Every structure is written in structure tokens, then in C-alpha cells.
Image (cartoon, rainbow, N blue to C red):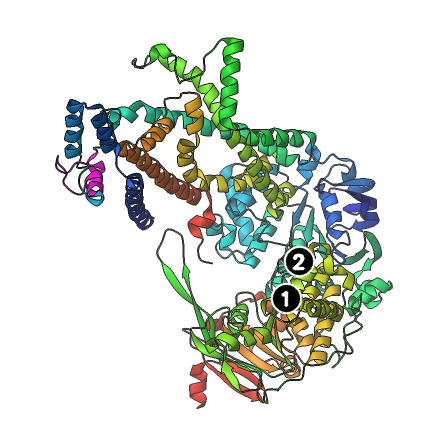
Amino acid sequence: MIRFLLRRFVTMLVTLLIISALVFFIIKLPPGDFLTNQIAELRAQGESASIAKAEFLIQQYGLDKPAWQQYLVWIGVMPGPNGFSGLLQGDWGWSFEFDKPVVDVVGDALWLTLLVNLAVVIFIHVVSIPIAIYSATRQYSVGDYIATFIGYIGLATPSFLLALILLYYMNRWFGVSIGGLYDAQYAGEDWTWDKIKSLLSHLIVPTLVIGLAGTAAMIRRMRANLLDELGKQYYVTAKAKGLRPTRALLKYPFRMSLNPFIADIGNLLPHLISGSVLVSLVLSLPTVGPILLNALKSQDQFLAGFILMFVAVLTVIGMLVSDLLLALLDPRIRLGGSR
Amino acid sequence: MDAPLLSIRQLAVDFKAESGDFRAVDDLTFDIPKGKTVALVGESGSGKSVTAQAILQILPKKAHISGGSILFNDPAGGKTVDIAELGPTSDAMHAMRGGRIAMIFQEPMTSLSPLHTVGDQISEALMIHARVGRAEADKRTEEVLARVGFPDPRRALRNYPFELSGGLRQRAMIAMALITRPALLIADEPTTALDVTTQAQILDLIKELQAETGMSVLLITHDLGVVANVADEVVVMYRGRVMEAGSREEIFRNAQHPYLQALMRAVPRFAMEEGERLTPIREVKSASLARVHAVDRPQPKGPILKAEGLIKCFTLRSGWFSGKTRTVRAVNNVNLALPAGTTLGLVGESGCGKTTVSKMIMRAMRPDSGRVLFDDGTGPRDVHGLEGDALTAYRRSVQFIFQDPFSSLNPRMTVYELLTEPLRIHNIGTSDERYARVKQLLDLVGLDQRSLRRYPHSFSGGQRQRLGIARALALEPRVLLCDEPVSALDVSVQAQVLNLLKDLQSALGLSYLFVSHNLAVVDYIADTIAVMCRGYIVEEAPKTSLFRNPVHPYTQALLAAVPDPDIDRPLDFGKLRAGRFSHPSEWPEPFRLVHGEAGIMKEIEPGHRVRLGSHRAREAA
């Protein structure tokens, strides 16, 4: 067990290292960077004071050095102008566009993103699992057809469109503005009870909008998995033992059909961050998605790099968690391998 | 006389199908007396499993009982209950199911949940039906596991099904069924998926437990050998109806119904005359089989296929988290020779290495040492050294027939695509020629030429196996490797496929390596038989010599374990109970092999060799 964890830990580190290199060089691929673009613009306008500041920043962050040196400084294995100061040391860099440290830019957005996405994950599972069980156990019944039909609509509706529609009608019918994650008056305020209440009520619509497609997909997959398991012999055995139908269903086939979803946790985390960008833009949610999009467009390299690395770390950790959970839940993985 | 435990009267079960209703069980009437074993015999699709499901009210959703009664007289008191009247989800039915009537199934592998421990699944049955606490349930489970023959019942509580062998899994199923002390045990093909030796032990166990508890057993099987050994009464079903019913004596001594007589003639027996043919219930009709003849090509002087000193080791990892490994010799110094135009039978229990040998011959797996020599008439060449055109030619010459006719045919390809695929891969013929060839192949195996556009799922098991044979024949091979080709088939179909293989051999001059665990089947088809155990060939002989004079204790045990459909030749359960005949270190001298030694093969009559421990051999020398 410990050997396994150690091995996994080392491979995780190697993976992250490779990802960091890829992330950095892909961001650097387009010619120029944020500051040189800005300097060119400022020159055109003839503002020498700002140019001096920009040039100071170029010096400060070593943007005049070759890319590989910038990379090593960024991850913190090579001394930069401020000595060893990179991701490894906890220095996440400077956002040129916002003219603030990256920490301050993403600060709240990071955990709001996690919050929204956690809400979405819970919503998807809570809604889809009961529907899927209903659908599978009553295959080809009227209820199954209705669930299937709604599922298809959910899959086929673009979520940003749904967001727009809800935005319009919520305002028109109830006079509520559903944009953002809390009412405008709380922006920049400390976290008071009122602000949290406002946050929770604003959370409903984004959760619904982002979660809908996922719920529909999950119902389909869960139903198919469960249908496979329902035909298995061990379920007949359970029934022949005299188990009540619900208990037999939940203890045996349902438990089996969960495996693919546990294996999927690793994929879920990064997908939730990158998947909700469009909706976040439309609903003007203060999440990481729109910030990342903007940072990539303007080549704000440290900001973009940090967010991408954050997603990568989430993915790798998610994979580890799902592997460990699978081993915990499935004895064939824990004890097998001898065949 | 007591009222019977269960009386079924005019039972009818209907299935709803798209093409209209279909009656799977029709006017079924029979009794199960107290403390007796009733065997329900028939081919697959005859309605015997549906009957069992109806008794437990666990019919599939599309099926329902549409008439008749199932009267259950519980010996533990209470009045007679008509199960057919009870709702499938009623309290009375839940109490009955698993409590008074328990069931065990054919596939011990899939009948247990892989995610729950054996102890959990067995004690669950008890806790549903009796008011017992966790500790009490565990204690009772341990007792019942010990009773059904688990060597270490305390550990078995925490074992998962995949950690157990097939035989132990079936024992666990029996423990699960018996922990509630039911009045009736329904055993649906309980031993079909098991080796003969394990089968004999399980049958013995069921008989013993029956004597102990006085329960009745409804045994569902298609194997008349099993029936002859354990049943008191026999009910023969065909297409949902009873064809014949009576005591075991009446049925076996004086079979009346032509269907039953035909079924009897279809089973391979040891006492068959030289050259006697099995009579399948439905004979394969082929117009071209009589006219085809072997392709004219150079014949090898020696054996067409030869294995010399094959050794294969596997490294096992004992778990996902631990780095511990151990090495197992799956195949240990195996020498085989297959003369052209003959059949070599390779017999042994599952896990003895016979499939590994056939894979090495096919070059699907590389031996650790030793050679496989193939002689196409130009002299023997090492198969594992072949490359390029020579390898392609070898692939054409040696084809494979698989055990499972369901998974060995791609369900998304039509028969035409399936049969032309080998020709396409080897780039043989134009499309017109391929079409003609496929039609000829279909006729050769007795299938209708109109089936070209159909998909495999619309064929029965036996027809699919014939498709598999046709596909193997497409490239005009010299050698067919048959890996348990009939063990997934009913007896009636088995006879059909075996006869087809025999006819094809004499018509086309094919050589077969026939791998099976069923000695009676091998006896019917093979010329020479090699018996394999734990990676060793322990005895090898022409078949007459092997069956007349089996020398090795393992061969003797295998022979003794085959149930013969002849009530005058019952199984000797006492002899099989010892049960340690598949451990080389526990064979009596001079056969004992210790510390993985290979021993030597000693010739005791012409062509009849048996493996002795090298200790003994040294003494003799």
C-alpha cells in the first residue's frame, strides 16, 4: 500500500512537471507577450512614463530572457531577479493585465468556482441517480420514455442559450436579476450572513444551467450500466434468496453500476472548470473560467499559466482519489491482479 | 403415503414476445416427493429453467404464470400453499423464496456478487429469514461453510468469490441455499460449468446433505450421466411439455418415448463399440460432405505437428498494492506428437495448462523453452522461428475452433462476412470465387445457404459452433486446434458437432488437437489421448489402451469421475471423496513428483507412456 502510494506520488510529480512545461510553452507559442504588445501600443501613443514602467516589469520578470529560462524561473528551480521565487516557493507570479499579484486576481474566484462546481456535481448525482434507477427498472415504460425524452432535450440544449432564456424570463416575470453570484451591493464586501444568503439564492440558476447537460448524460449512462447489471445472474441469486426488491437492487446491481462513475471523478474536476466558461460569461459569474479565457487572449502568461496548472493539479489529484476509491470499493482491484 | 412436497398441476407459463405470446411451459404436471431427488431433463429451450423460475416466482418480466397450480406442502407445518396464486412481491412469497425453497445456479462465477464477501452473501440469506444477530449469523455461516467442505471456513467468511476456485464457489452457493434449512432445493445445472472431478464431489455433497436434512431436490440438467447417478425420479421435458416421467429405473431400463430414446443414444459412453456412431437427435444434412476430398498436397513423413519440451511459466502478482510475485509453471516439459490425419485428445481439469499448450502451438504465446515443429511435407520447421510468407502459410494451415460459440463470432458481421474474412485476410480468390467457397462451406457443415445474410444471434448454439467450424475450414487448413468445442453445447447438439468433426476429418484428411475436460467425449473422437495435470503430461496412450488399463492415479480418478448414463455403472463417490488426486506431491509412489521435478515418462506398453517420479526412475536404473 505504501509502496503503491509512493510510486503514484512520484508519477504524479513527473506528470505535473511535464504538464507545466507544456502549459508554459504553449502560452509562449504566439509571438510576443503581454508587455511587448503593450509597449508597442504605448509607443504609438507616445506615453513614455508607462513605457518605463513596462520596461521595468520586463526586467523584473525576466521576459527578455530565453523562454526556457523564464520557464525555470517560473516554476522556481532557477534564480530570477528576486532569487528563487516561483510556483514551488508559493509565488504564483504577477498579472500584467490587472497589475496585481495573481493570488489577488484569482483569490475569491478560485473557491467560488469550486463551490459552483461542487453544487453542480451534487445536483447531477442527486437528480440523475433516482431517475436512472426508475428508468432502468421500468425499461420501456411510459415513465422511462418521458425521462429519456427530457434527457435528450437536456443533452441537446446549449447551456448558454438556456442561461440567456432564464436570465430574460426571471427578470421579466419575477424581477430578479440572476447574473453574478451575489447581489451587486455585496461586491467587495466581507462575508456576512446576508452575503452568504444572497450567494446561495444566486447559486440555484447556475447550478441548474451548468448541471442540466451533465444530468441528462448521467441518466443515460447510469440507465445503460444498470440495465447491464440487472441482467446478471447474481441479481437473480439475490432475489432467489428472498431479498426485497429495493434492497436487492441497491445492494447488488446498483453498487456494481457505480464503478464507472467513481473512475470518472478524475475527469470530472477539470471538466467542470473548463466546461462552464460559456455559462459563466453569460451569467457573469465571478469564476475562474472567464478570467482564464481573458488571460489567454491577452497573453497574460503568469495568470493563464497558474490557472492551467491549478486545473492540472486538480486532475491529477482527482485521478488519485478515484483510483483509491475504486480500490476501496472493488475488492477485485484491491486483491486481484493474480489473473 | 405422504402428500408430495410440491405438486405441479397443469402449469402454463407464457412469454410476451413481439411476434405474439409464446407458451414456454405447457400443461406441466409432476410431483416432488419429500426427501427425494427429481431430475428435470431436457435440451436448452425445453422450459426446464422457466419451471424453476415459476416455482420461485422469479420469472423474467415478460413471462407470467397463465394457468395451473404449484402446491407446496411445508413439512414444517402450516397448510398447503398454492405458489401460483401468490403475488411475486407478497410477504408470503418473500418468506418462501430462500427460506423454504432455495436455488443454486449453473454459473458459480456469475451467481455471486464480486463486490461482497462470501460470508456477507451467505449470512444475508439467514438474516432475511431468521431473527438472528450479526454474531450468530456469522457463527452459523462458518458452520455451514465447514459443512460444505471449506478447508478454512473462518477465512472464507472474508474471502471474495473471485479468490475461490469454481468448485469452492459452487460450494459457497450451496451453503447460501442451505443455511436456512429449506424444504426444497432447486439446482439449475449445478455442475455443468465444473470439471468432472469437481462435479462428482458437488453431486456427492448434495446427496449427503439431502440425507442429513431430509430436503427434496429438484435437479435441472441436460446431462443424463448426472441423472443416472443422483435422481430418484426423472421428468423429461421437450418444448415445454413432459415427454416421459417415471422412476430412474423405468426411465433408464425402459425408455418409452422416442425423444428420450434419441437423447440416450446421443450421449457418448465408455462402453461404446469400436466404430459405433452417436445418433444425434437432428442429423446434419450435407449434400457436399460425401463428395469433398482432401486437397492434394505433399504429406509429412513424421507427425504433422510436434511439441518438444514446452515450458511456460507465469508470474503472478498477488495484489494491486503489494509487490509480491510468485512464479507458476503452467506447462512443464510437454512433449506431444500429432500424426497427420489423426486426432490427439488432450484431457485435464481447468487450470492444468491445456489451453496454454494450444496457444503456444498456435503461436499466440511464446514458450519459455522448447519448440513446436510443424511439417507441411517439406520437413519439420520450428513454428516460433517462422517469419514472413512461411508464417502466413503456417497460419493458413493451422486453424482454431473455440469453446464459446456465442462470443467467438462477431455479432455485427453477417455469416457471409464472417466466413469470407479469412479469405480476405489472406487475399484469396475474387469476390465471385469467395462467394462460391462460402456457399460450399455452409453446405459442408449442413447449414442452409440462405443464411448468408443473417447475423449470428439468429442461430442456435450448435449452429453457431458449425459456423465456427466452417470459418476454420475456409482456408483449407491441415490442422484444427479444437479447444473444448462441445462443452458449451447440449448433449443432443454435442453429438451432432462431434459427428460433423469426425466426418470432416475422414473427408478432408484433417488432423485435430482436441482439448477437453470430458473424457467420454475425447474417447469418442480421439485416436491418442494425453492426460494433463498441473502442467505435466501424466499419461499418454492410444485410446483403447488408456481406457482398458489406466495406470496413473490421476487418470484413474478422472475416469472414475465421469458419470455414465447407465445405472449399472454408478459413480464411486467414496473413491472420489479422498479428492487429493490432482496434487503431484500426493500421488502414491512411484508417481509422486516433489519440488517441481519433471520425472520421466516410462513406456509400459507400445505407445502407452506414464510419468513416474525421478526418484523411482533412478532406483530402477
State the residue at coordinates (55%, 56%).
Answer: B168
Q: Amino acid at mark 1?
A: Phe
Q: Chain under label 2?
A: B
Q: Image check: A189 left or right of B287?
A: left
**Is A329 or B386 nearer to us in this picture?**
B386
**Viewport quadrant of the C terminus of chain B:** bottom left
Residue position marked by numbered label 2 in the rendering: B207
Is there a contact, CB below 8 Å, between mark 1 and mark 2? yes
Residue in the picture at 32% in, 38% down = A313
What is the span of residues highlighted in magenta in the rendered image? A70-90
Q: CA distance from mark 1 to mark 2?
A: 10 Å
**Residue density around tag 1, few if under 14, some if 14–19, many if 20 or more, within 10 Å:** some
On screen, residue B152 above or below B253:
above
Does residue A274 appear in this view?
yes
| Label 1 vs 2, first from the N-terminus | 2
Q: Are marks 1 and 2 on the same chain?
A: yes
- Height in image: A198 above or below B206? above
| Secondary structure found at label 2 | helix
> Residue A64 at x, y = what percent?
17, 38
Residue B257 horizontal/vertical position (percent): 86, 62
Circle 1 residue? B573
Where residue B151 sits in the image (x, y, percent)?
50, 57
Q: Quadrant of residue B66?
A: top right
Res A95 seen here = no
Q: Residue at x 36, y 24 (%)?
A: A112
Name above or below for residue A247 compared with residue B24: above
Left or right: where A202 falls relative to B140: left
A71 part of magenta stretch = yes
Queried whether the magenta region covers residue B395, the answer comes back as no
**Is residue B564 or residue B265 the one in the foreground?**
B265
Q: Nearer the viewer, residue A141 or B437?
A: B437
| Element type where label 1 sits in the image | helix
